Image: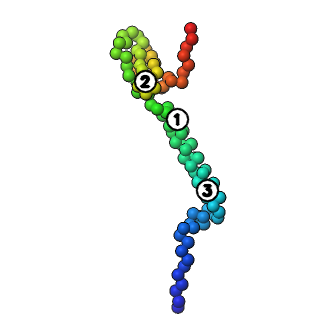
Amino acid sequence: MKFVKAPDNSADWPFALFGGGTIQLVVLAVVALFLAGLTLRLLRGRRGGTACRWKRDPRARDTLVRWQCAACGVDAFTSDGRRPKECKRHMREARL
């Protein structure tokens, strides 16, 4: 009985796995990268992008407490003394 060595096709496994050509493999990689980017963007959106770090104005003695974000620099006011729950940087300025 004579043993014959099998051909070494270990470098071709991605092509054989997805049924053939380079184009299908490239398209699959692009779709995977797109989905990964979309997932990361959605997860970042849930957190609100850059998280605001609210600092209380020590001079505030009125019923409204002034807070300033250290990350984006926007001002916000609360009446209960607690820091704001969401970033206010996308809100428009009020006109009188």
**SS for callout 3:** helix
Q: What residue type is labelled 2?
A: Cys
Residue situated furthest bottom in the rendering: 1
- The alpha-carbon separation of the residues under discs 3 and 2 comes to 44 Å
Q: Secondary structure beneath disc 2? A: strand
Q: Which of 11 and 80 is in front in this view?
A: 11
Residue 15, horizontal then vertical, whole percent = 60, 64
Disc 1 or disc 3, which is closer to the eye? 3
Q: Name the residue under label 2.
A: 69
| 77 over 26 or under it: above or below | above
Q: Nearer the viewer, residue 41 or 80?
A: 41
Tell me the crowding category of disc 1: few under 14, some 14 to 19, or many 20 or more residues within 10 angstroms, Cα based: few
Q: In which quarter of the image is the C terminus?
A: top right
Mark closest to the chain's N terminus, 2 or 1: 1
The residue indicated by pointer 1 is 45
Please indicate whether residue 90 sits to the left or right of residue 84 in the image: right
Q: How crowded is the residue under tag 3: few (<14 C-alpha within 10 Å), some, or many (20+)?
A: few
Which residue is located at x 54 percent, y 21 percent?
91
Residue drawn at (40%, 15%) of the image: 65
- From the image, tell me which residue sits under label 3: 26
Is the Cβ of the residue at disc 1 closer than 8 Å to that at disc 3? no
The quadrant where residue 70 appears: top left
> x and y percent of residue 44 in the render?
50, 37
Q: In this view, does 73 lie above or below 20?
A: above
Q: Which residue lies furthest to the left in this view?
A: 58
- Residue at 61% of width from left, 58% of height from top? 25
Pointer 2 with pointer 1, Cβ within 8 A: no
Q: Name which residue type carries label 3.
A: Val
Quarter residue 4 falls in:
bottom right
